[in-house]
Image (tube, rainbow, N blue to C red):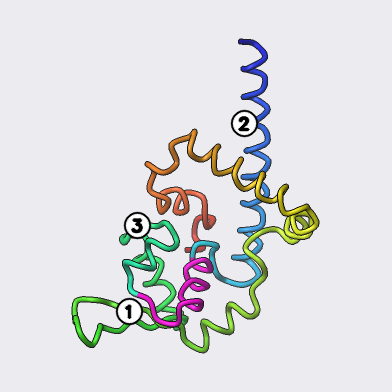
Amino acid sequence: MENSTLMSEQVLIALRKITHAIDLHSKKLVKHYGITVPQLIVLKEIERKEKISLTTLAKNVSLSLATISSLLDRLEKNNYIQRSRGEVDKRTIYVHITESGMKVIEKSPSLLHEQFLQNFSELEEWEQHLIVSSIQRIAAMMNVETIDPGLILKNFYPPQGVE
């Protein structure tokens, strides 16, 4: 039992280091580029799809509709996206990226720390899969699927006063 406790504490320490690194990178992104990590994730997903409904967008980035709506309000205020009603079903709202939004994506850095990306890309493919599956397993063990990711992102990003 004692060994199990020590191992779980090592997991907690490693997760804390990861969280700290992500937090530092996020603060840098806000400071230098004026956009939060969740906003950039959403913006990149909109850019990939060219035209996407709110429901599909929320599903694709694992955020609630309420969180997506709030993020889109800020992106629209900065003229990074535009919303429009569907032609067939007027209740459906679609999101499109603007030229300003494209420029933000072009100038913004990676969502993850560059050193991590470099090291990760140098791993064998099986090692990459092992890391991804291990992290997904940790998330599942922590019941992350039952927590609204929007709450996590809202509490984690950005620093107060930046949103």
Q: Is residue 107 left or right of residue 35?
A: right
Location of residue 25 with respect to 42 vertically, above or below = above
Please name whichever residue, 49 or 33, is drawn nearer the observer in this view of the structure: 49
Give x and y (percent) for residue 72: 39, 71
- Mark 3 vs 2, N-terminal side: 2
Query: Farthest residue toward the top?
Result: 1
Inspect the magenta stretch and tell me whether residue 44 lies in it: yes
Inspect the magenta stretch and tell me whether residue 55 lies in it: no
Question: Which three-letter amino acid code belongs to the residue tagged 3?
Answer: Ser
Location of residue 37 with respect to 82 vertically, above or below = above
At 44% from the left and 75% from the top, the residue drawn is: 75
CA separation in Å, label 3 and label 2: 27 Å
Q: Secondary structure at mark 1?
A: strand
Please name whichever residue, 19 or 92, is drawn nearer the observer in this view of the structure: 92
CA separation in Å, label 1 and label 2: 40 Å
Range shown magenta: 39-52
At 66% from the left and 66% from the top, the residue drawn is: 110
At 28% from the left and 77% from the top, the residue drawn is: 93
Q: Quadrant of residue 130?
A: top right
Question: Which three-letter amino acid code belongs to the residue tagged 1?
Answer: Tyr
Residue assigned mark 3: 64
Residue assigned mark 1: 94
- Mark 1 vs 2, N-terminal side: 2
Question: Which three-letter amino acid code belongs to the residue tagged 2?
Answer: Leu
Give x and y (percent) for residue 74: 41, 72
At 71% from the left and 49% from the top, the residue drawn is: 126
Counting every numbered tag in the picture gives 3
Residue assigned mark 2: 12
Location of residue 29 with respect to 106 vertically, above or below = above
Q: Secondary structure at mark 3?
A: loop
Q: Secondary structure at mark 2?
A: helix
Dot 3: within a 10 Å radius of its alpha carbon, few (fewer than 14), some, or many (20 or more) residues? Answer: some
